[in-house]
Structures are given as C-alpha cells and as structure tokens.
Image (cartoon, helix red, strand yellow):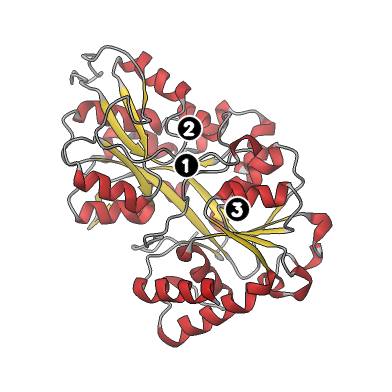
Amino acid sequence: MQTPDQMSKAGELTRRELIRYGGLAALGLAAAPLLAACSPEGGSTTTSAAAGTTTGGGGELTGPLNVLAWDGYDNPAILEGFAEKYGVDINVKIHGGNSLGAATLEAERGNWDIINVDNDWIQRLATQELIQPLQRSDYPTLDEMWAPFQDFAPHKLDGTLYGVPTRFGINGIIYLPDKVDVSRVNDAEYLWDPSLAGQISMVDWLDLYIPLVALYGGNKNPGTVTGAELEEVTQRLIDLKPNVLALHGNLGDVGGDLAQGNAAVAWGASSSDLAIGLGVDGVPVELSIPDQGALLWTEGLGITSDTQHLETAKAYLQYMTSAEVMAEMAWNDQFKIEVANAKAVDFLTDDQIEALQLDKAQEWFDNPNILLSETPEDLEGWEAAWEAFKSA
C-alpha cells in the first residue's frame, strides 16, 4: 500500500454523505441534524453512568464525553460497554460529513472532546489547533493494527501523532455477475462500454471520481490533477454520462439500485463495505479492484484541544481501538465494515471474517495499485470540473 506523507480525500463533499450502507434495512436512513448544544436532546445517543472512575494510572475520569463522529459510533453496545467499564456518560453526535464536523468543532469550541474524521482531516484539524497531540505510548493497541496503520503518516503532522485509525475500505467496482461481462470487470475502461448504458449507479462525491479517473489514466498521484489533465478527466466523466443511471446523495440509494436490479454496477461509493452489506442481505454482488487501480479510504479519532475530560478522552481512544470493540464496529446490526485492528478477527467468526473480506486485507495493502486517496492540489478546479460533469 502506498503511504505518502500527505494522503487524504478533501473538499466540501465527503466520502459518506448522510449514511453508511450496512444492509438493506439501512436504505433511506439519514444522519441526524447537527447538534446546536451537546446534550441528549437533538438526536444524541447517551449512556448513563456516574463519572469519577479512575484509570489504571490513577487519572480521574470525568464526563460526560462528547463525541462528533461518522455513522456507527453511536452503536448502543459500544457505548454501554464503555459506560460499564469506565462509569462515564457519552454523548455521540453524527456530524454527517468531515467539513460539517470540523465546522461544528470550530464554532462550538469547548463543547466537544472527540472528533472522528477521514484521514486527511486529522492533519487539517491539527494545523488549525483544533485537536491535540497524542502520546503513542498511551495507545498500545496501535501495535495490533494492520501494518500500514501502526505508524500511519496521515495521522501525523510534522512527525507528531494526532489521530488513531479505526475503519477503512476500498473504492473499486461492485457488479451483479449476471448483468455484466464478467471477463471485463477488472478493466476500468469497461465502465465506458455502451453495453452498460443506464446501468451505473454513483454517489455525488467529486473527491472520489476525479482521482479514480486520473488513476485509470495512469496518474499514480491523482491528487495532483489540474490544468489540461483535469480537462481530460472532466471530459472522460462527461463521456460516461450515457452509462450513468443515477448520481445519488447517499450510499443507501446506490445499494438500492443494485438490490432492486435497476443497475448492474455501483462505481466507487465505499465499494467494499457496500458490497459486504449487500452480500449479507443476499444480493449476489462481487467486488472488482480494476487492474488500473483503486483508492483506499480511512478514518480515525482525535482528541480536541479544548477537552475538559482529557483522561476520559484517552480512555475512549484506547477502548475504541481495542480488538474486541473494533470487532463490534465491524459486525453489528447497522454496519458490516473493515476495521484497522488486525486482532479484531479473534472476536469474529470465520464466516464474518470472509464476509468482511478481512482475509484479503493484507493483499489489498500489498497491492501497489491500491492507493490512499490524496488531498487535491486544485480543489477549486475539481469543484468546477465536477459541476461541468453534472450539468453536461
């Protein structure tokens, strides 16, 4: 796996708008609106327990702990487990997007203790001094991570650690075998074949498809796309329009297109976990990593600079990165998703490991054509290119 110093997805549009697809039951679910003031009202999930527990090192745990996160961090089993172990209330608010979470954190300084964002946003928040440095020795579970995540460059700024990894996945191509030419699905150029007219479902993420098209064209550093190359990428996207069934605002609708047989292909759209959810629900999909390459997304947890509950925040990061909790994150009623702690497999069944494709994780990391997403150097140009594609 490629791990340059600056790796991320950027832009106002995010990897997951509103929902993370975790099975057909998740279709149509939307993230809650942003919390104006952190409290159980307004959609927060809260556990109830008394504060004041102490850590093994003697530090007192105070609370409640207020967490801004992607979908899935409000899992009741995880929250109740933390409350039982540490005796502290936790409020989790689903922020609905990296930029929304960052804006809320900045606007409501002092109200939040933890933020969960995609890999590039850790460095951004560190630069803005919205999150604080971490001592790696406080997080021994990092030694249990898949090798690329044990010393993860995107979670550092100037060599200092600011985040711990939690979940990851692949953006490739999902397909229904009986509706495509299976012999061609490993060639990304197949997406442009006229036989797929009106058969491709996508999600409205400029920071995914622009670098994918650039990668397919041979650029191994697709975050650098600008100028004439960006014009070529834009035209390639416009050329794809006849094959696009829909450009959705959320992953549930993309999954629904495949589940209902309206589309033969879902391109990108958090492919690996979308494919897992569909497969568990009995939809006969397959995941292809094209010969030209695919993009890897990751996310992590950081502690805010203004937290009033530092010891509790540290305990939360330790807890959330443990193998047992990550196994619960990986496989629950809401989500089926890959996680960063390799030892999570010790708490999963063989069937769950296979369904999650964690048995393929090392193969993905070793594949030189699977790249971590990069921050665009020309975000304004990307935004204009994406609008040109959508309006064509």
Give 45 or 76, whichever is nearer the viewer: 45
Instruction: Say which quarter of the image contains residue 315.
Output: top left
Hey, what amino acid is under mark 1? Ala
* Residue identified by numbered label 1: 340
Q: Residue at image x 38%, y 39%?
A: 142
Instruction: Say which quarter of the image contains residue 136.
Output: top left
Hey, what amino acid is under mark 2? Met
Measured as percent of width and height from the top left, residue 323 is found at 47, 30
Mark 2 touching mark 3, by CB under 8 A?
no
Label 3, secondary structure: give it: helix
Mark 2 touching mark 1, by CB under 8 A?
yes
Q: Residue 271: which disc?
A: 3
Q: Report the quarter where the C terminus lies.
A: bottom right
Residue 66 seen in this snapshot: yes
The answer to which of marks 2 and 3 sits earlier in the sequence is 3
* Residue identified by numbered label 2: 326
Q: Is residue 240 above or below residue 61?
A: below
Q: Residue at image x 25%, y 56%?
A: 157
